[in-house]
Amino acid sequence: MGLKINREECTGCSNCVPACPFGLLEVVDDVVRVKEGCTLCGACVEACPANVLSTEEAAPAAQADLSYQGIWVFAEQHRGQIKGVAYELLARARELADSLKTEVGIVYIGSQLQNIASLAEHGADKVYLVESPELADFHEDAYAGVLCELIGRYRPEIVICGATALGRSFLPQVAARLKVGLTADCTALDIDADRRLLRQTRPTFGGNIMATIICPEKRPQMATVRPRVFIKGKTYPDRKGEIIRVDLDGAAVTSKTKLLEFIEDVSEKINLDEADIIVSGGRGLGKAENFALLKELANLLGAALGSSRPPVDEGWLPYSHQVGQTGKTVSPKLYIACGISGSVQHMAGMQTSDVIVAINDDPGAPIFEIATYGIVGDLFKVVPLMIEKLKGQK
């Protein structure tokens, strides 16, 4: 499959050159040539007045292996406690599975695992447990080996995982070992029930467009999904799922690396991923010391402290506070943006917040386009007034 050029009839008119959105066409010796990286979008074919350009037809997609059945969620945990993203994905997996009339499975890996029953209460039909002292701490190669072993044994058609630091590090290894595709950082998942395809939507080109990706041939279909994209579903205490304890041989759970020490991030009093209120600062703060003002406001509100990318790049705050396309995706009840202009990348990480309050002295700042309430003013005057008011209420 590729772009075909009838060189004998090409006049070198160059009409197709500006039509290519990627700048991959050039005219050399009165004949058009295509560089590497052509996506076969067809824009040049439509622009050619001499009809010398055409795209080759793609070969028919191979039939997917229908023996793969069911939707799996990877349950991320830390020290035996399940992360909230697992419940968010479980709620969406339950909806997708109902469309396909199939089961929901959840894979829970670690040591001394807790809250197992809650997974069934949130929609899992089967809970696959792999417990071993060697799996108490996360190791990429060990977790990847375990999940590959489980997929080979039980053959799910879809596997999804949170696009967290953990999910981003090991799920690509699983996809590579299984030689299947993986769509990273999805913001939406849907089902084409007729073809049993997972429609995986994610931002691309810096968040300017949304791409929907399908994997029609290989199984399982795999994706990582940003936390807080989906809402945690209701619990059904009477719901019972099948608990499957899986014993694997030692080779599957061993790792080439050894964890020497785990250092907790003590800079976060409240987890940014789980916060109901977030106070975020941007380049408008001017310097690291000025974040003390936002910390005071956050403490009064019982909020987490967030940041756009520039303050993190400047070293004013650790990366764990960054909100945006290259940071964390959040969806709190209240998001207060102070001195943040509102780049596409930042807004992609917080625009699903219930209420957005933007404080900026530039009335043309893009953040005001998505803000629920906008305050045009100097944050160094507005924020102290908010702090004074809150102290008065307390």
Image: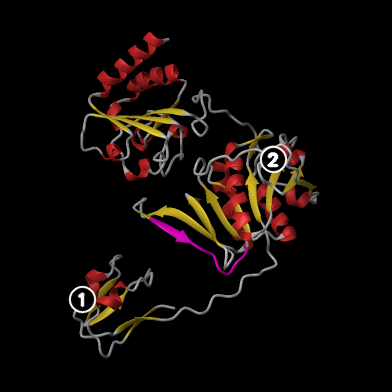
What secondary structure predominates along the stretch shown in magenta?
loop
Percent coordinates x, y for residue 373 in the rendering: 31, 31
Q: Earlier in the sequence, mark 1 or mark 2?
A: 1
> Residue, x 21% and y 33% (percent of image)?
362
Q: Quadrant of the C terminus?
A: top left
Callout 2: few (<14), some (14-19), or many (20+) C-alpha neighbours within 10 Å?
A: some
Percent coordinates x, y for residue 80 in the rendering: 69, 34
Marks 1/2: CA–CA distance: 61 Å
> Residue, x 51% and y 23% (percent of image)?
269
Q: Secondary structure at mark 2?
A: helix
Give the numbered dot on residue 126: none
> Residue, x 49% and y 44% (percent of image)?
229
Percent coordinates x, y for residue 254 in the rendering: 73, 47
Query: Residue lying farthest bottom?
Result: 8
Q: Nearer the viewer, mark 1 or mark 2?
A: 2
Label 2 sits on what residue type? Glu
Q: Is residue 286 above or below residue 349?
A: above
Give the numbered dot on residue 15: 1
Q: Is residue 288 above or below residue 188?
A: above
Percent coordinates x, y for residue 70 in the rendering: 67, 58
Q: Between residues 345 and 359, which one lies in front from this camera angle?
A: 359
| Left or right: 185 as drawn, with respect to 6 | right
> Residue, x 46% and y 55% (percent of image)?
201
Based on the picture, tell me whether residue 165 belongs to the magenta stretch.
Answer: no
Q: Is residue 5 above or below residue 317?
A: below
Magenta residues?
Answer: 210-219
Which quadrant of the structure image shows residue 282?
A: top left
Q: Secondary structure at mark 1?
A: loop
Q: Is residue 174 visible?
A: no
Name the residue carrying label 2: 121
Asked if the residues shown at circle 1 and circle 2 are in contact, with their CB atoms under 8 angstroms apart, the answer is: no
| Left or right: 220 as drawn, with respect to 34 | right
